[in-house]
Image: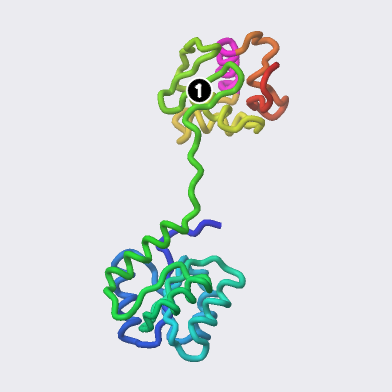
């Protein structure tokens, strides 16, 4: 489930001054930091808070950063930025191989660390699927950006309410919308007192405009007693 509100960053660092400084800069940038001074606390807090990212110092007591990272990776893909005074290439490679997403060597700039946090979160965020700007079904073509409908390459004029219904139906072919759901598309904030038969009137007008035989529709179909759906199969 998608989390709302500030992103939670778990900061694991045994030096209290460094820990406080990182938390301060994260708060200034709108993050919600959770702090731990050792590996055992880090694992416990990770389970409790389900952080969006972990900043993990390798040289921490109880359970070292390598083991913390390994355990996190057993059941989580949370991004991890390793933080350490050890800057040898072999350590960086080992950290990245273990599953870290980035590696910051001390001493570091807190501003740079926060910039790395933002960059890692951007890379790890699931890419939202871009909605198609043009919906096509058989001879019917709806351009969502230009708000234009054509049938057999001929433009069809739509009222704002007819366009709202076409956009909803064509975007989810095969899904049955109840009359109440379609009414919400027409009057999203209860702008008018209407009856569900208003939807039937608009659907009838749409069929007159797009169907080869409105009395025997092949695009906008009726599910009796429920509502309407756009055909999920190409007419033929």
Q: How is the image coloured?
A: rainbow
**Is residue 214 found left or right of 141 in the rendered image?**
right
Tell me where residue 40 appears, x and y as whole percent: 53, 86
**Is residue 90 found left or right of 222 in the rendered image?**
left
Q: How many marks?
A: 1
Q: The N terminus appears in which quarter of the rendering?
A: bottom right
Tell me where residue 105 appears, x and y as whole percent: 35, 77
The image quarter in which residue 23 lies: bottom left
In the rendered view, would you say 232 is above or below 128? Answer: above
Residue segment shown in magenta: 197-210
Q: In what element is the residue under mark 1?
A: strand
Q: Which residue is mark 1?
A: 142
In this rendered view, identify the residue nearer to me: 107 or 48: 107
Asked if residue 102 can be seen in this view, the reply is yes
Q: Residue at 52% across / 71% down in the picture?
A: 97
Q: Residue at 48% across / 82% down in the picture?
A: 65
Dominant secondary structure of the residues highlighted in magenta in the image: helix
Asked if residue 194 can be seen in this view, the reply is no
**Is residue 175 found left or right of 14 in the rendered image?**
right
Tell me where residue 21 appears, x and y as whole percent: 29, 79
Q: Residue furthest bottom?
A: 62
Q: The C terminus appears in which quarter of the rendering?
A: top right
- Residue 202: say if magenta: yes
């Amino acid at each position: 489930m998608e989390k709302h509100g500030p992103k939670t960053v778990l900061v694991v660092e045994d030096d209290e001054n460094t820990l406080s400084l990182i938390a301060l800069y994260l708060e200034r940038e709108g993050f919600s930091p959770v702090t731990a001074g050792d590996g055992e606390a880090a694992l416990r807090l990770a389970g409790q808070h389900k952080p969006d990212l972990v900043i993990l110092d390798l040289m921490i007591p109880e359970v070292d950063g390598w083991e913390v990272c390994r355990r996190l990776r057993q059941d989580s893909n949370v991004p991890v930025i390793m933080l350490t005074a050890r800057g040898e290439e072999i350590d960086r490679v080992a950290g990245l191989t273990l599953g870290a997403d980035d590696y910051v060597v001390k001493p570091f700039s807190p501003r740079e660390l926060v910039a790395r946090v933002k960059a890692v979160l951007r890379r790890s965020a699931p890419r939202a699927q871009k909605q198609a700007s043009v919906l096509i079904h058989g001879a019917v073509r709806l351009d969502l950006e230009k708000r234009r409908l054509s049938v057999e390459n001929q433009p069809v004029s739509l009222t704002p309410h007819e366009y709202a219904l076409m956009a909803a139906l064509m975007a989810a072919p095969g899904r049955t919308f109840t009359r109440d759901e379609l009414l919400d598309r027409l009057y999203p904030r209860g702008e008018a007192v209407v009856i569900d038969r208003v939807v039937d009137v608009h659907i009838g007008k749409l069929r007159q405009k797009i169907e080869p035989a409105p009395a025997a529709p092949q695009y906008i179909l009726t599910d009796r007693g429920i509502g309407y759906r756009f055909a999920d199969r190409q007419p033929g």
